[in-house]
Every structure is written in structure tokens, then in C-alpha cells.
Image: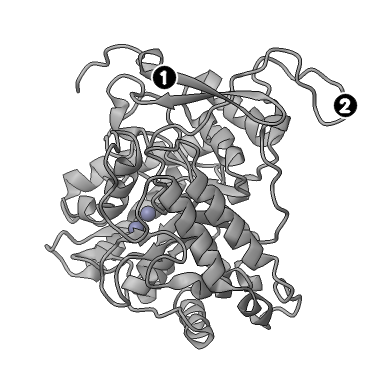
């Protein structure tokens, strides 16, 4: 293993300042992260500098220590039963992800616990762990709305025992990180047959690894959350039946769940653009897996058509799914109280303010707050309120922000000037997340 050089955080910080109505914020862009972990950087959104001792807890007038956050710098978060957020950067330390989520008004978030493209990473520092926990508390995030994403390298379905063991170690390490951070969910891609065995053999390997990880983390409550996939190549999990088959073989069912990615399900052939299509998809999920296993969703529009088997995320409303599909989700009571996480292109290359995610979150929250959402009648739901909203106007709003951020809505290619650690990295990682498993 290559030796770590030095802590490169400082070298990589470029600072600029901007002034909001209430406070001065130092915006830092981490263009290089710690040592060799450059690849993990998704570009750091604005980071608010740590206050010293002057910050106070709401109304209590109590000093909250060196890691305190000036809450007045952060946007007010919308109160909704649907917990919308984004996969935010953890560059510079996992604790920054909490702050980055709050900066974009997210009520839920995802993060990488370590470099998603390396087999081993240095352990979490005590300082990172305690800062992560205190920020979670200070910014009122619940661990059930945080959905960490596992390394892309992990393939628990690999028939090669040695390679599977390597994946397992990386997987177990992720679970232990979740425990250290007080998190309770862990999302990962089920795996791939790598073209060498039939899917059921791989599924058994995956379930065996999950069972083993449960035994290797006694006392832990972390739920391993399988993600549905788009169906490219030899990847397992595009069919809900695959997910059900894996779960059937898991012994401790209290520690397994599923995350549904809208782009992946659409690419896999589940057409969720109409109320009927959404309903029958959820019913299919319920019969093959069980709704009680649903622990989160990835909200992504799709650059490719239904059944394309391609994993190409697009901004909300800009791709083939369109806003109406998301209105169905954001008015469905069955999707309440779980993390609903954007993994859309952030186009932050020029603006650095994550305006696109802020806008997408705003639009999704607006859908969820439409008059007919949140009906108490269990399975009953109605999107009439949401349909009355002007979907075209909402879509145009998102497109405008993308254009203002320097991006081109619907185009795969990033705009000129995208830097390492910026939008390019986000897109590359999303575009290749399936391919990387076929090794
Ligand atoms: Zn994923
Ligand atoms: Zn994807």
C-alpha cells in the first residue's frame, strides 16, 4: 500500500468570502483532500468556519464549544413528512457532510464514509467522530434520515473467494464506521456475477456476507440497505425479485433493508411516470420484497428511456422521468420519514453554491407540501393538489438554476472549467457506479 504523504487539507483550501444578510461566511473549496484521497473529493460546498465560544443554542444563551455552528448562517429547513436531501460532500472529514447538508436546506442526506474508490482508508479520527455527532445534534438530523453510501469497489457477489473477501473487509469497515458515527443505515450495491456464475449463486454469496457481517458486528443496529440497480451487465438487483431473494436468505431481517433509486428502477423497466405505473411498481416491490424493508430512496431523473438498463442520472424534471413522477413519490405517504436523497449533477463548477440542489430540494418540498399530500388514509393518496401545481414552471425553475450555475440541463458533458473534485467527479462516479463493480 502506498504510504500517505501529508495532510493536504490546508494546501488545498482556497478561500473566498461572501456576505449573507446575517453573517459572513467563509467559503472554502477543497480542491485536494487529505493526502492521496483526492478521489474522494466531490468538492466541498461552502463551509462555515467554526465559531469560537460566542454561538449560543437557540434561546438558551449557552456557549456550545469550539465546534459550534452559527445557526443563523444556515437556511431555514422546510418542515415536511417527506425527508428530502442530497448526497453531499464529506471532503475534509465526515463531519463536514452534516454542515453541507444543512447549507442546502436538506432534511436528509447521504455521504461516503471514506474514499469510495479505495480499498482501505485511514480510520475516522476521534475529532471527526465527535464533531459529526455534535453537528448531527446541533443541526437536528436524525440518524434514520442519513443514508451513507458504500464504496463502489465492494462486490459481495463475486464468485472469486479472494476478491469477495477483500470486498467483505471493506464492507465490514464501512459498517463499523457507521457504528462509530451513531448511524443506523448503510446503503450499498448488492454486487455482480462478473459474468462467471448465475445470479442466484451471487445472491447467496451476498446474503452469506450480510449474515457474516451481522455476526461480526454484535450489538450493532446498523441496517444494511441493498440498492436496486439499473440492470446493466452482470449486476444483481435490477429486478425486485433479486432483492427479495437476497433478503430471504438473511437471518437477522431486522438488519436488512432496501433503497430504491428512481433512475435505476426506470432504467430497469419500472415505468413510474403515471399514477398507475407508480402504484403497480410499489405493489410489485411490496410483493417481491415487502414495503417494511424500504429504508430510503435515491431521487434521480434519468437521462435515458425506460428499460434502457443504463445508469445515467439527470436533474429532477429535466430527464425522462419528469416532475410528475416525483410528484407521485412526494405525495405518497408510504415514502414518508425515510431519506429521499438526490444524486443528481450539481453543476457547481462555476457557482460553488450548490444552487441546483437547493432548487431541487425546494421544488421537491413544494410537491410534498401540496394540499393533497400527506393524507392520513394509509394507502390512499391523491396527487390532484400536486398536479394543479405548474409542473412546467417548476421544471423551468430548475433549468434556470442549472443554466445560471454554468451547466446545460440534460447534457451529459460537464461545462468547461469543471475541475477535479467538482461536478466532473460527481458525474463520473454516478455514470460508472455500475461498471466499477464488474471487476
Ligand atoms: Zn448507489
Ligand atoms: Zn446510479
The quadrant in which residue 158 appears is bottom left
Could you say where residue 355 lies in the image, as x and y percent from the top left?
Answer: 51, 45
Figure disc tally: 2
Residue situated in front as seen by the camera: 140 or 52:
52
Q: How far apart are marks 1 and 2 (CA)?
A: 35 Å
**Disc 1 beta carbon < 8 A from ligand 1?**
no
Q: Is residue 98 above or below residue 261?
A: above
Would you call the spot at circle 2 few (<14 residues within 10 Å), some (14-19), or many (20 or more)?
few
Asked whether disc 1 touches disc 2, contact meaning CB atoms under 8 Å apart, the reply is: no
Pointer 2 residue: 60
Q: Quadrant of ligand 1?
A: bottom left
Is residue 247 at all visible to an observer of this figure? yes
Q: Which residue is drawn at 32% across and 65% down?
A: 303
Q: Earlier in the sequence, mark 1 or mark 2?
A: 1
Residue 53 appears at what percent x and percent y?
73, 13
| Vertical arrangement, residue 228 with respect to residue 24, above or below | below
At mark 1, the secondary structure is strand
* Residue linked to disc 1: 14
Q: Quadrant of residue 240?
A: bottom left
Q: Where is residue 358 in the image (x, y as percent from the top left)?
A: 55, 48
- Tell me which residue sits at (39%, 41%) in the image: 172
Q: Nearer the viewer, residue 394 or 386?
A: 394
Q: In this view, does 15 lie above or below 298?
A: above
Looking at the image, residue 44 lies above or below residue 197: above
Amino acid at each position: 500500500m502506498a504510504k500517505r504523504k501529508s495532510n493536504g487539507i490546508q494546501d488545498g483550501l482556497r478561500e473566498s468570502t461572501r456576505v449573507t444578510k446575517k453573517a459572513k461566511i467563509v467559503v472554502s473549496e477543497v480542491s485536494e483532500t487529505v493526502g492521496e484521497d483526492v478521489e474522494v473529493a466531490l468538492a466541498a460546498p461552502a463551509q462555515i468556519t467554526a465559531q469560537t465560544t460566542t454561538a449560543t443554542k437557540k434561546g438558551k444563551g449557552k456557549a456550545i464549544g469550539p465546534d459550534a455552528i452559527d445557526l443563523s448562517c444556515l437556511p431555514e429547513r422546510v418542515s415536511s413528512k417527506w425527508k428530502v436531501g442530497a448526497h453531499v460532500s464529506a471532503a475534509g472529514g465526515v463531519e463536514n457532510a452534516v454542515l453541507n447538508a444543512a447549507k442546502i436546506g436538506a432534511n436528509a442526506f447521504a455521504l461516503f464514509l471514506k474514499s469510495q474508490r479505495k480499498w482501505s482508508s485511514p480510520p475516522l479520527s476521534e475529532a471527526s467522530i465527535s464533531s459529526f455527532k455534535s453537528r448531527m445534534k446541533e443541526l437536528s438530523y436524525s440518524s434514520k434520515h442519513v443514508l451513507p453510501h458504500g464504496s463502489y469497489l465492494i462486490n459481495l457477489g463475486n464468485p472469486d473467494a479472494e476478491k469477495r473477501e477483500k470486498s467483505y473487509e471493506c464492507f465490514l469497515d464501512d459498517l463499523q464506521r457507521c457504528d462509530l458515527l451513531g448511524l443506523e443505515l448503510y446503503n450499498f450495491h448488492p454486487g455482480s456475477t462478473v459474468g462467471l456464475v448465475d445470479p442466484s449463486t451471487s445472491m447467496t454469496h451476498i446474503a452469506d456476507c450480510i449474515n457474516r457481517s451481522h455476526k461480526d458486528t454484535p450489538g450493532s443496529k446498523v441496517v444494511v440497505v441493498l440498492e436496486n440497480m439499473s440492470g446493466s451487465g452482470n449486476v444483481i438487483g435490477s429486478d425486485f425479485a433479486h432483492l427479495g431473494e437476497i433478503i430471504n436468505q438473511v437471518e437477522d431481517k431486522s438488519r436488512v433493508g432496501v433503497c430504491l433509486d428512481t433512475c435505476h428502477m426506470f432504467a430497469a423497466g419500472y415505468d413510474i411516470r403515471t399514477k398507475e405505473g407508480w402504484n403497480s411498481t410499489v405493489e410489485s416491490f411490496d410483493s417481491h420484497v415487502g414495503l417494511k424493508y424500504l429504508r430510503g430512496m435515491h431521487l434521480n431523473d434519468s437521462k435515458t428511456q425506460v428499460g434502457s438498463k443504463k445508469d445515467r442520472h439527470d436533474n429532477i424534471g429535466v430527464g425522462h422521468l419528469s416532475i410528475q413522477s416525483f410528484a407521485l413519490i412526494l405525495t405518497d405517504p408510504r415514502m414518508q420519514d425515510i431519506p429521499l436523497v438526490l444524486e443528481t449533477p450539481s453543476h457547481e463548477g462555476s457557482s460553488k453554491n450548490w444552487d441546483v440542489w437547493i432548487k431541487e430540494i425546494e421544488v421537491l418540498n413544494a410537491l410534498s407540501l401540496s394540499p393533497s399530500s400527506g393524507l392520513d388514509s394509509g394507502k390512499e393518496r391523491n396527487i390532484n393538489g400536486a398536479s394543479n401545481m405548474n409542473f412546467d414552471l417548476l421544471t423551468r425553475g430548475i433549468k434556470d438554476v442549472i443554466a445560471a450555475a454554468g451547466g446545460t440541463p440534460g447534457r451529459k458533458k460537464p461545462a468547461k472549467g469543471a475541475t477535479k473534485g467538482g461536478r466532473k467527479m460527481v458525474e463520473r462516479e454516478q455514470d460508472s457506479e455500475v461498471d466499477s463493480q464488474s471487476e
